[in-house]
Amino acid sequence: MSAPPTIALLFTTFPKSTETFLQREVAALQARGVNLRLYSLWGGGGNFRGLPVRPFPKWRLIPLFLFVIPWNFVRRPLLIGELCKGVFTRRAPSWLNFWENMLGAGFAGSYYREFRRHPPTLVHGAWAGAPATAGWLLWRILGLPYSTGAHAYDLYEHGGDWWLMEKLAHARFVHTSTEMGRQLMVARGADPEKIFCIRRGLDSFPACKPLRPHRAKLRLVCIARLVAKKGLDHQLKIYAALRAAGVAFEAHPVGDGPLRAHLEGAALALGVTHEVKFLGHLAQPEVWRQLEWADVLLHTGVVAASGDRDGLPNVIPEAMAAGVLVVTTPTSATTEAVAHERTGLVAGVNTPDEWVAALRRLAADDELAARLRTAARRWVEENYDAHKNTARLHECFMKVIAP
């Protein structure tokens, strides 16, 4: 009797508080009876829902360089030569991406003998960086089939991952969570037949709170890492424009990041510290409480200088599910969920007056607000159900690992 199929899931860091969508996917696959082996290449570890999460101890790189690589120069000269040629003749888009790929290569070199002794049916990299590099090299070394996710960071940061197209070319299937991402990969030459846009999702839908009847003082929330692609500099200018226009509001940016000190200084310079309270990183239950409090979620996403940008941030469908109105920029895939005048409002990031006009409408027009909220909730229920979407992901896995 053959052993049941096993999927080795490779993550950069797992579990991670800012990547709850990955935890939902693992939980849903586990609930469907899939045998899972979880590996975290950078940090993470411990246990998740009774499953051990194996971290990658970096001391394993020492025997890799001392013994494994020299030995494979003898055993696999063509493979090692090809990889070395690629490393030294093709410039990495950034040092960070270079080391991400080296991390994935180090994992594959350190663990391939273990994977040879106990081969999984499929190796799946959650991201197209280090995890996919590990899966791709395990295929090159052992012939193990692999698949990968490819999302906004993988596709856009400094023009995309260093070895992206090689990894996509040999993957059994590619999971992306936006149509924007799928179209980009097809435009770059990836096989459209094996790229699947499968959105993230919610395990359960929160109650859609009633519309707050008196919104003369708007409650605004932004839930984002404080990094360049979130456009918080522009958002602070929107708050200053609201203040100058005499629109009463209170704003809660939720999240932390390297730009926090800069943004707090900018808020002081713009004179909006009375209205804007930076709450820092909050646990997920506190984030939901902020959504219960808020009237409107603001998303001011931009294309960062590095090329990085959002896909469809999970907080947008989460806010839509909870009955929070959404105003967003048209950057990236946000408009796949927030259709202007149908499920939310869209405004240009460099036109604060548009945002002032949009927020005034949402404060005063109950009919508009009710219509947008109803349509937004319907979109989330149709497109952002974790059980339906993970069923599609599960189907992709099953087609690959079927005998």
Image: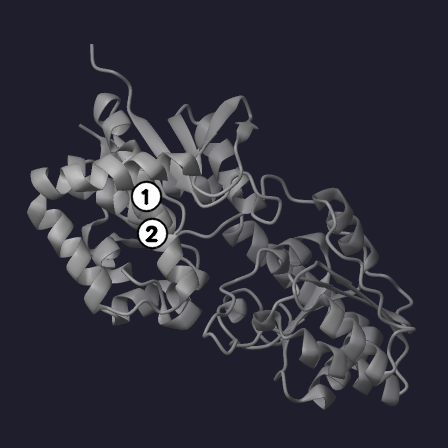
The residue under label 2 is which amino acid type? Met
Image position, residue 81 (x, y; %)? 12, 53
Image position, residue 241 (x, y; %)? 80, 87
On-image quarter of the C terminus: top left
Q: Can residue 309 be seen in the rendering of this structure?
A: yes
Which residue lies under the disc numbered 1?
106
Q: How many marks?
A: 2
- Residue ID at (52%, 62%): 312
Of residues 295 and 238, which is closer to you in this image? 238
Q: Are marks 2 and 1 in contact (CB under 8 Å)?
A: yes
- Residue ID at (19%, 50%): 170
Q: Which mark is residue 280?
A: none
The residue under label 1 is which amino acid type? Gly
Q: Can residue 365 be seen in the rendering of this structure?
A: no
Q: Which mark is residue 102?
A: 2
On-image quarter of the N terminus: top left
Q: Is residue 51 above or below residue 170?
A: above
Of residues 310 and 255, which is closer to you in this image? 255
